[in-house]
């Protein structure tokens, strides 16, 4: 075995040990952006219907809509949104262990120049990413 081959083997081993086993199931940003488009168009019922089962069990659709109307609409229309980072976690406080992606977006709105939108997604058992949470600061 050559030095470069053994270095590659060690790197491959370390990568597999340090990375979650589901790291190949990365979240395409377009999926999050498609879900955010429901919020952008005030389609709150659709955002709830396309969210993860966990969110649907935790928050009834009318409460979800009421919360978004109160906390999202005051910002006005989206002027610009740019993906910032995505973090992958196996555990999050207060919810069952799973496969989670936390996507952050730097967003400009009509009535707020700089905001940070965070969408928490989960990889469901059927292999699809679905939203389980949304915050805006």
Image (cartoon, rainbow, N blue to C red):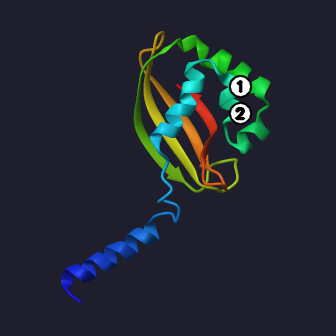
Identify which residue is drawn at 66% across, 21% down: 68
Q: Position of residue 4 (x, y in %)?
A: 20, 79
Q: Position of residue 83 (x, y in %)?
A: 41, 34
Direction from residue 98 to residue 19 in the image, left or right: left
| Number of residue marks | 2
Question: Where, by quadrant of the figure, is residue 61 drawn?
Answer: top right
Q: Position of residue 131 (x, y in %)?
A: 62, 39
Residue furthest to the bottom: 1
Question: Where, by quadrant of the figure, is residue 48 drawn?
Answer: top right
**Badge number at residue 45:** 1
Whether 94 is drawn above or below 110: the answer is below
Identify which residue is drawn at 28% across, 76% down: 8
Whether 1 is drawn above or below 11: the answer is below
Q: Split into 4 quadrants, where in the image is the N terminus?
A: bottom left
Question: Where, by quadrant of the figure, is residue 106 drawn?
Answer: top left
Q: Position of residue 35 (x, y in %)?
A: 57, 32
Task: Estimate how packed mark 2 is, as few (under 14), some (14 to 19) or many (20 or more) residues with alpha carbons within 10 Å.
Answer: few
Seen from the viewer's position, the closer of residues 46 and 75 is 46
Residue furthest to the left: 3
Kindly identify which residue carries mark 2: 49
Direction from residue 17 to residue 49 in the image, left or right: right
**Badge number at residue 19:** none
* SS under mark 1: helix
Real-space Cα separation, disc 1 to disc 2, in angstroms: 6 Å
Identify which residue is drawn at 63% across, 36% down: 133
Identify which residue is drawn at 20% across, 86% down: 2
């Amino acid at each position: 075995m050559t030095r470069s081959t053994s270095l590659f083997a060690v790197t491959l081993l370390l990568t597999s040990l340090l990375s979650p086993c589901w790291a190949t199931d990365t979240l395409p940003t377009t999926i999050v952006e498609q879900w955010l488009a429901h919020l952008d168009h005030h389609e709150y019922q659709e955002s709830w219907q396309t969210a993860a089962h966990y969110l649907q069990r935790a928050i009834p659709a009318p409460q979800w809509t009421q919360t978004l109307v109160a906390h999202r609409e005051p910002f006005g229309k989206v002027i610009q949104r740019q993906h910032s980072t995505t973090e992958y976690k196996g555990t999050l406080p207060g919810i069952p262990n799973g496969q989670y992606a936390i996507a952050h977006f730097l967003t400009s709105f009509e009535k707020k120049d700089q905001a940070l939108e965070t969408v928490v997604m989960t990889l469901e058992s059927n292999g699809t990413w679905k939203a389980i949470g949304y915050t805006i600061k």
